[in-house]
Image (cartoon, rainbow, N blue to C red):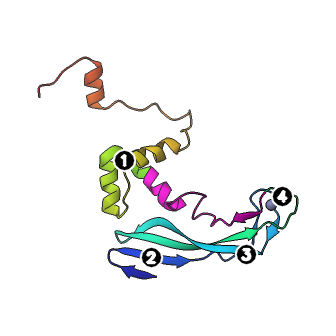
Amino acid sequence: METAGEGVTIFARPGATGWPCRVCGSWSERVHSRYLRRVSDEPVGGRPVTIVLTVRRFYCRNADCAAATFVEQAEGLSERYRRRSVPLLATLAQVGLALAGRAGARLAAQLGVKVNRTTLLRLVRALPEPELTEAPPVLGVDDFALRKGNVYGT
Ligand SMILES: [Zn+2]
């Protein structure tokens, strides 16, 4: 682990000796190539954290499989095509739920995460629907006043 400037960088590599093919599930330990993937993680002490993952691409050993090669995944840390870790995404979704839009983006920045409000909204929309047994949302005072047709002075 190193601290460079304001951020913290952690270098990591998955510990498994091989990985199952994402198409056919065959286990392979035959490494095709390695590359680095950068994943933003939850901040530490207000500093942004970047995990630099060494990711391996394996040959699929199943001759009948459509995939010639496949990439291993770091379960619980990163999903395919994601630049942010799973725990960080969960935290940001909660920030977006509590404070939508710019206020949420500002809070995230205070926590050490750069995120725009559009991304926050997308994460909130991706959250599972609440159970139908929950109470309906309570209207805020402003909503109520607007619905009653009241207009307040500027
Ligand atoms: Zn395969």
Q: Is mark 4 on a helix, strand or loop?
A: loop
Q: Which mark is residue 9?
A: 2
Q: Name the residue under label 3.
A: 31
Q: Is residue 89 found inside the magenta-colored segment of the image?
A: yes
Q: Distance between the residues labelled 2 and 1?
A: 25 Å
Three-letter amino acid code of the residue under disc 1: Arg
Q: Name the residue under label 1.
A: 117
**Residue 62 percent location from the top left of the image:** 86, 64
Left/right placement of residue 38 relative to residue 138 reads right
Q: Quadrant of residue 13?
A: bottom right
Point out the quarter of the image occupied by ligand 1. Answer: bottom right
Q: What element carries label 2?
A: strand
Residue range in magenta is 67-93
State if disc 3 and disc 1 touch (CB < 8 Å): no
Q: How far apart are marks 1 and 3 (CA)?
A: 40 Å
Q: Name the residue under label 4.
A: 65
- The 10 Å Cα crowd at callout 2, few under 14, some 14 to 19, many 20 or more, is some
Quadrant in which the C terminus is drawn? top left
Q: Is residue 37 found inside the magenta-colored segment of the image?
A: no
**Residue 25 percent location from the top left of the image:** 80, 60
Of labels 4 and 1, the one closer to you: 4
Does residue 55 sit above or below 25 in this rendering? Answer: below
Three-letter amino acid code of the residue under disc 2: Thr
**Residue 3 percent location from the top left of the image:** 38, 80
State if disc 1 and disc 4 touch (CB < 8 Å): no
